[in-house]
Image (cartoon, rainbow, N blue to C red):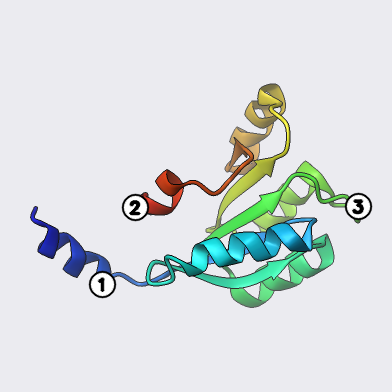
C-alpha cells in the first residue's frame, strides 16, 4: 500500500474517542495536549481528575478508549476498584490502566476479569500515538 493510500484511508476513518482520567490535573493537561497533536485520529471527550468526574464522563460520552490512572484514590472506587464499574457503564470501552510503578502481578490478576490492560507510565510515546487503533 503506498503512502497516498494510507493517508486517504486514515482521513476516512472516524476519530477514536478518548477519556483521560488522571489524579494530577497537570498530567491530564499533558495527555490532552499530546492527543491534540493527533486530533485527526483521537478526540479527547473529557479529561478528569477524580472518580466522580470519571464515572459521569463515562456515562455522558461512552468513549471508545478510557485511559485511567491507577493512582486515583479519592473514593470508594479508587485504583483497580473502578474497573468493574467502568465495564458496567460502558462495556464496549477499551480500558488502559496506567500504573505508576511496575506491579505486573496486579496487572495480570486484574486484566482478564475486567477486560483491561495495565501498562507502565510514561503512557505517551510516539509508538502509542502512531499505532493504528
Percent coordinates x, y for residue 17 in the rendering: 50, 68
Name the residue nearer the viewer: 70 or 32: 32
Q: What quarter of the picture does the C terminus occupy?
A: bottom left
Labels 1 and 3: the sequence-earlier one: 1
Residue 45 seen in render: yes
Q: Quadrant of residue 62 in the image?
A: bottom right
SS under mark 3? loop
Q: Mark 3 sits on what residue?
A: 76
Q: Residue at x 83, y 66 (%)?
A: 52
Q: Are marks 1 and 2 in contact (CB under 8 Å)?
A: no
Percent coordinates x, y for residue 76 in the rendering: 91, 52
Q: Quadrant of residue 27 in the image?
A: bottom right
SS under mark 2? loop
User: Is 64 situated left or right of 6 in this image?
Assistant: right
Q: Mark 2 sits on what residue?
A: 132
Q: Mark 1 sits on what residue?
A: 11
Residue 89 seen in render: no
Name the front one of labels 3 and 2.
2
Name the residue nearer the viewer: 11 or 122: 122
Task: Give above or below for 19 relative to 104.
Answer: below
Amino acid at each position: 500500500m503506498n503512502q497516498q493510500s494510507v493517508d486517504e484511508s486514515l482521513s476516512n476513518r472516524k476519530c477514536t474517542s478518548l477519556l483521560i482520567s488522571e489524579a494530577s490535573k497537570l498530567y491530564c493537561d499533558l495527555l490532552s495536549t499530546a492527543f491534540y497533536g493527533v486530533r485527526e485520529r483521537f478526540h479527547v471527550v473529557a479529561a478528569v481528575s477524580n472518580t466522580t468526574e470519571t464515572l459521569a464522563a463515562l456515562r455522558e460520552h461512552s468513549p471508545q478508549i478510557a485511559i485511567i490512572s491507577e493512582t486515583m484514590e479519592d473514593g470508594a472506587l479508587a485504583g483497580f476498584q473502578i474497573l468493574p464499574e467502568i465495564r458496567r457503564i460502558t462495556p464496549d470501552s477499551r480500558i488502559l490502566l496506567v500504573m505508576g510503578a511496575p506491579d505486573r502481578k496486579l496487572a495480570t490478576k486484574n486484566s482478564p476479569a475486567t477486560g483491561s490492560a495495565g501498562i507502565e507510565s510514561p503512557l505517551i510515546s510516539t509508538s502509542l500515538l502512531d499505532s493504528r487503533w
